[in-house]
Image (tube, rainbow, N blue to C red):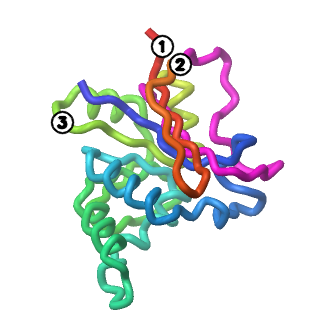
């Protein structure tokens, strides 16, 4: 059975975006970017909310940029090949190896998790929050940046009940970003 993973950069005070959607503070250094390349290479499917999709759609054509670095070209190739599902009620169309769904999140995640293959990833605070509220997320991967934002979009949604987790991996990058990998406690 495949696992659903929620990886996301966060500020020390738990925001994935600052006021006005600012994510400039979360740009990865070279080592962290390489880590993300390998992480995404090992995914089977990626579920995205509309805002994250609109941010990541850049990678659908990044390989056409003559100034793109080899690392960016590699990530673009991986991203383009990765099957993606965007959950949105406002988008009319999506690009690349992507399909659009308007509803049925719980059913779709259950169907995907029951398949053989590589793990799944979910991104976007709203979509991940809906998955967390339904108990669908098996693993949380936080990339904690050394910044306090004070406001913005929260990593974790408001929940009715606590989610008990166990720490399974940590790593500190030269940029002082700390990677914390948690899975559901058994």
Q: Is residue 145 above or below residue 129?
A: below
Per the image, label 1 sits on a secondary structure element best described as loop
Residue drawn at x 58%, y 35% is 129
Q: Which mark is residue 86?
A: none
x, y percentage for residue 83?
A: 26, 53
Can you identify the residue that label 1 sits on? Answer: 185
Residue closest to the eye, 148 or 169: 169
x, y percentage for residue 16?
A: 64, 50
Q: Earlier in the sequence, mark 3 or mark 2?
A: 3
Inspect this view and state whether residue 127 appears.
no
Look at the numbered discs 2 and 1 and tell me whether their residues touch, using CB distance below 8 Å: yes
Q: Is residue 169 above or below residue 12?
A: above
Tell me the crowding category of disc 3: few under 14, some 14 to 19, or many 20 or more residues within 10 angstroms, Cα based: some
What range of the chain is rendered magenta? Answer: 137-165
Task: Measure how far apart labels 3 and 1 are at the Cα level.
Answer: 23 Å
Can you identify the residue that label 2 sits on? Answer: 165
Q: Is residue 2 above or below residue 75?
A: above
Inspect this view and state whether residue 62 appears.
yes
Look at the numbered discs 3 and 2 and tell me whether their residues touch, using CB distance below 8 Å: no
Can you identify the residue that label 3 sits on? Answer: 117
Magenta stretch: dominant SS? loop
């Amino acid at each position: 059975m495949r696992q659903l993973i929620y990886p996301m950069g966060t500020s020390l005070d738990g925001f994935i975006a600052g006021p006005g959607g600012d994510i400039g503070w979360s740009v990865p250094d070279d080592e962290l970017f390489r880590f993300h390349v390998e992480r995404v290479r090992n995914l089977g499917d990626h579920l995205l909310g509309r805002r994250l999709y609109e941010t990541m759609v850049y990678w659908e054509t990044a390989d056409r940029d003559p100034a793109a670095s080899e690392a960016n070209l590699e990530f673009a190739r991986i991203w383009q090949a990765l099957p993606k599902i965007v959950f949105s009620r406002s988008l009319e169309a999506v690009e690349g190896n992507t399909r659009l769904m308007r509803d049925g999140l719980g059913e779709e995640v259950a169907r995907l998790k029951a398949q053989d293959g590589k793990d799944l990833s979910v991104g976007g605070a709203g979509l991940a929050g809906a998955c967390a509220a339904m108990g669908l997320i098996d693993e949380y991967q936080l990339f904690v940046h050394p910044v306090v934002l004070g406001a913005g979009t929260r990593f974790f949604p408001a929940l009715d009940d606590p989610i008990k987790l166990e720490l399974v991996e940590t790593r500190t990058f030269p940029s002082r970003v700390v990677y914390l990998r948690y899975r559901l406690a058994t």
